Image: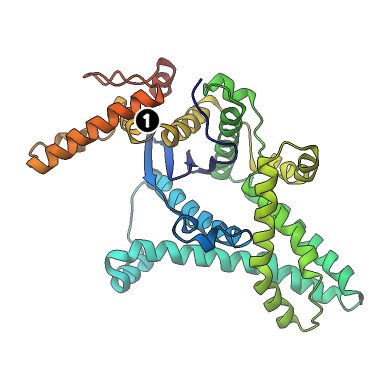
Amino acid sequence: MEERLPKGTLGGQAVMEGVMMKGTDSYSVAVRKPDHKIEVKLNKYQSYGDKHTFCKVPFVRGIVNFIESMVLGMKTLTYSSSFYEEEETETKTDKVFKKIFKEKAESALLGFTVFLSIVIAAALFLMLPTGIAQLVGRWVKSHILLALIEGVIRLTIFIIYVLLISQMEDIKRVFMYHGAEHKTINCYESGDELTPENVAKHSRYHKRCGTSFLFVVMVISIFVFMFITARQMWLRFVLRLILVPVVASLSYEFIRLAGRSDSAFFDILSKPGMWIQKITTKEPDEEMIQVAIISVEAVLYGKAYVKAVNETQGIGMEEDSEENENTGEDLEEEVRYDKETSDAYRESGITEPDDEIDNISDFEKSFFED
């Protein structure tokens, strides 16, 4: 039996018609394209925690992980959406960013999108509940009771928001891929072989889910915000904004512990967050499960596996055929790559491809059939 990654190592996210999976030092994105092919991409990834020891300190790492997850999530979602853009037209915003940031325009636009998302979230889940609580405060004098009321309002807004977006057709499919992502991780962490049949048997709920994280944020914010006794509306909002990193770090530590523990205590505490996942995850079909399996195995087996999957479907072959004139340095690089590919296949247990690229299992080949 192959050696498995420790529980809690794999994490992921549903994207447009696909799944992103993140391992220890890389992440993959597998997308079912309009032509029914599954294109998979693998990128090396190094978090700030790996670069700076301070960012791995408990409670600090939660804030770092939250920001990194937002940026990576937005980046992979944008990538997956690009396969479904009928005709890409340059907007006025694109032109402005290109003029100001030149070749870094795409990164700058992504950063701006993340910033805008944070502003909208702050307005919806901080300003609005605080404003409503301020009105209620005319009749409620206890700041503890007022904090509880505000927390309930915030949680209600969150649930209503999730319920509303779950009615959108595109979001319904994203939530189905979300279910596929959870089922695949649960299957892998249980020790079962990653086949569509095995994955389908597992739960679509997971304790480390981002939905559960947001729910925990809502609950912990109630207790943290109880310490704010200011009566002025603007000051109440500013103090809440300042304490958001504290709430996020505490929530992260709870989710991290719960995700790695099988104790009844953490199972009970995780239940409410997993109930919310009844909305944000849906039962996936077999094709969605296939995409999730490819995404997980791309992280497990590396670029050799990714190359095999893409080449089996003819993805990337056109680009390769145009690059016939190689320098000696290029040929040397290819030789090194071929050796790495061979080693990776041998270590992963996957049959190395022959000249006709007969390189992946029969059940995986069926993923690409129309």
Q: Residue 360: image x %, image y %?
A: 36, 21
Q: Does residue 268 appear to the left or right of 118 in the view shown?
A: right
Mark 1 surroundings: few (<14), some (14-19) or many (≥20) residues within 10 A: many
Residue name at image x 31 percent, y 65 percent: 104
Tag 1 residue: 37
Could you tell me which residue is drawn at 38 percent across and 36 percent down?
40
Where 347 sits versus 260, above or below? above
Identify the image quadrant of residue 112.
bottom left
Residue 169, above or below 157: above
Three-letter residue code for mark 1: Lys
Q: Compared to 147, does 280 lie above or below?
A: above
Residue 50 seen = yes
Dividing the picture into quarters, in which one does residue 278 lie? top right
In the displayed structure, 90 sits above or below 283; it is below
Pinpoint residue 156: horizontal percent, then vertical percent.
77, 57
160 with respect to 119 (left or right): right
* Quadrant including the C terminus: top left
Residue, x 56% and y 19% (percent of image)? 197
* The furthest residue to the bottom: 232
